[in-house]
Image (tube, helix red, strand yellow):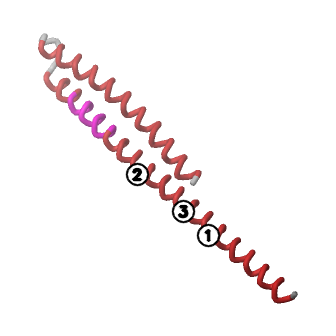
Amino acid sequence: MATAEAQRQSAIADRAKAASDVKLQDVQFKRAQYLVSQGAQAQSELDTARNRLETAIATLAAADKQIAASQASVNQAQSNVEQAQAQVASTEVNLNQNRWLRRSMAS
C-alpha cells in the first residue's frame, strides 16, 4: 500500500507542475497574441505559443487521469489489506475454536 500511496503523491506533484506550466504557457500565449497584433512578432511565434499551451493543457489532463488511476490503486491496496485482516481474524476464530474443542475432548 505504501508504494501505491507514493505513486499517488508523485502524481499529485506532477499535476501541480503541469498546472503551473499551463499558467505560464497561457501568459506566454497572451503575450504572443498581443505582440503579433502589434506587428512586433511573427505569426509563427503565436503558433508556437498556442502549441505549447495546448501541450501543457494535455499534460495537465493526463496528470489528472494519473491521479485517478493512482487513487484507484490506493483503494485496491486498502481493500486488499482489509480483506487480509478479515482473513486473519477468521483464522484466529477458527484456531480458538479448535483449541477449545481439543480441550473439551481432552477433559
Q: Mark 1 points at which residue?
A: 87
The percent position of residue 31, horizontal first and vertical second, equals 23, 16
Whether 59 is among the magenta residues is: yes
- Residue 45 in the image: above or below residue 60: above
Residue 74 numbered mark, or none? none
Mark 3 surroundings: few (<14), some (14-19) or many (≥20) residues within 10 A: few
Residue 58 drawn in magenta: yes
Indicate the amino acid at tag 1: Gln
In this image, 6 relative to 63: left or right?
right
**Which residue is denoted by mark 2 in the rendering?**
69
The answer to which of marks 1 and 3 sits earlier in the sequence is: 3
Query: From the viewer's perspective, is 73 left or right of 99?
Result: left
Q: Which residue is denoted by mark 3 in the rendering?
A: 80
Please tell me whether residue 36 is drawn above or below residue 63 in the rendered image: above
Q: Give the range drawn in magenta.
A: 50-60
* Above/below status of 105 relative to 68: below
At x 50% / y 52%, what residue is drawn? Answer: 74
Closer-to-camera residue (44/68): 68
Amino acid type assigned to the residue bearing label 2 in the image: Ala
Give the quadrant of the C terminus: bottom right
Element class at badge 3: helix
Quarter of the figure with residue 48? top left
